[in-house]
Amino acid sequence: MALFMPQGTIAETDAEKADIDAIEALKESSSIEYKEEGNKFVKMGKKHYAEAVDCYTRAIDQNIRDPQHNSVCYANRAHVNLLLGNNRRAYEDAEEAIKLNQANVKAYFRGAKAALALKLIPEALNIAEKGLQIDPSNIELEKIGDKAKAIQDEEDAKKKRDLEALERSEKLATLLEGRNVKVGKATYNHLTEGRKPWVDKSAMMHWPVLFVHAEVMVSDFIEDFFEMDTFGGHLDIAYGDDAPSLVWDTRHEYTRKRVELYYLSNAGRSLSRKQVVHWLLENDVGRQFQNTNYDDDSDDYKKQRWVKVDERATLYSVLSRPDHIVSGIPVFFVIATGTSFHKTFLSGGWSLP
């Protein structure tokens, strides 16, 4: 009898053909009944979704010779899996439904929706576009396609911004190397909002710079210190006759004639080029490089000392000195001469808190 014939065996006699046709008819009838039963369970609500999935699975397992019917069963199971939040299963079922019947618009909609939920944006866009070729007036498919397109456009724009940021950082790292400027761990980000140096159209560098009044640990932030500017010009602005008075300087000791600038030599270990690039990219276009290791195991601290800055010098000439490690951004300590703190500072009796 055909019932016991191996699957795929070709019937040779009329009786065998009749038996196979009868079996196929039974399987088809069972598959249709399972599908309709599944539809009923879906209408009964969420508590019965698992039973609906089981019915659609049984309908598919009948493996009947009707690809359109099987496509509907896969698409229906995809629908219930979407309702259950089983987006991966829904996506796979929708793909199978489309393979069986490329005109099944519901399968395209459910596949695109599942892909969107899985953040498979290119796939969601592709499925939606193919579905709209079949049914151009399908508003729901169009909505999913538009949403996927918007996400794709934003991702493409972000990739472009990230690439541009990387190119800028690589260029800046090259300029720093060419200027013999060494960068160390950024230790003053909390005072500068993560500001970084930047390059103008003439390939000249501009730095954010901190002037720290060591005596009271109050800082002034210079957002744009051109690398070829001298320190004297900035001191004129900050401490000249027309400059606003310093609230904490009640003795009026920090005047233009009395202020001096110092930097701490060998203020840490200089970063590698890769680390510098990563540092320049931090907080840029939302990028974070959590795995960059800035641990400092250098013995350069033994060589640290306070170095007085000649106010006639340019920022570049000071930053490029062999003993100068820029702590993310240049930091200079402002001291007033003729004070007791000045003596303490120069004698080594004061250190960074």
Image: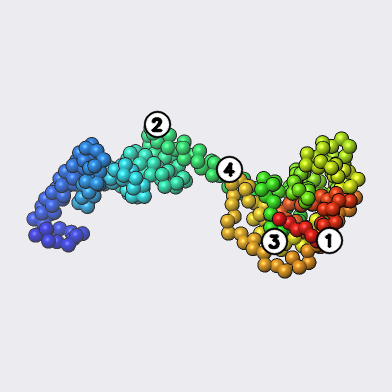
C-alpha gap between disc 3 and disc 4: 30 Å
Give the labeled residue for mark 3.
271
Q: Nearer the viewer, mark 3 or mark 2?
A: 3
**Circle number at residue 347:** 1
Q: Is residue 345 above or below residue 236?
A: below
Among numbered discs 2 and 4, the one appearing first in the sequence:
2
Q: Residue 209: x percent and y percent?
A: 76, 48
C-alpha gap between disc 3 and disc 2: 55 Å
Q: Write the residue at 47% across / 46% down.
A: 122
Q: Secondary structure at mark 4?
A: helix
Drawn side of residue 142 relative to residue 262, left or right:
left
Drawn side of residue 203 relative to residue 120, left or right:
right
Q: Quadrant of the N terminus?
A: bottom left
C-alpha gap between disc 2 and disc 4: 27 Å
Q: Write the residue at 45% across / 42% down.
A: 125
Q: Residue 308: x percent and y percent?
A: 86, 56
Q: Do the CB atoms of the residues marked 2 and 4 lie less than 8 Å apart? A: no
Is residue 233 visible in the rendered structure shown here? Answer: no
Give the labeled residue for mark 2.
139
Question: Which amino acid type corresponds to the residue marked 1 in the rendered image?
Answer: Ser
Drawn side of residue 221 relative to residue 16, left or right:
right
Q: Residue 236: x percent and y percent?
A: 87, 42
Question: Which amino acid type corresponds to the residue marked 3 in the rendered image?
Answer: Leu
Among numbered discs 2 and 1, the one appearing first in the sequence:
2
C-alpha gap between disc 3 and disc 1: 30 Å
Among numbered discs 3 and 1, the one appearing first in the sequence:
3
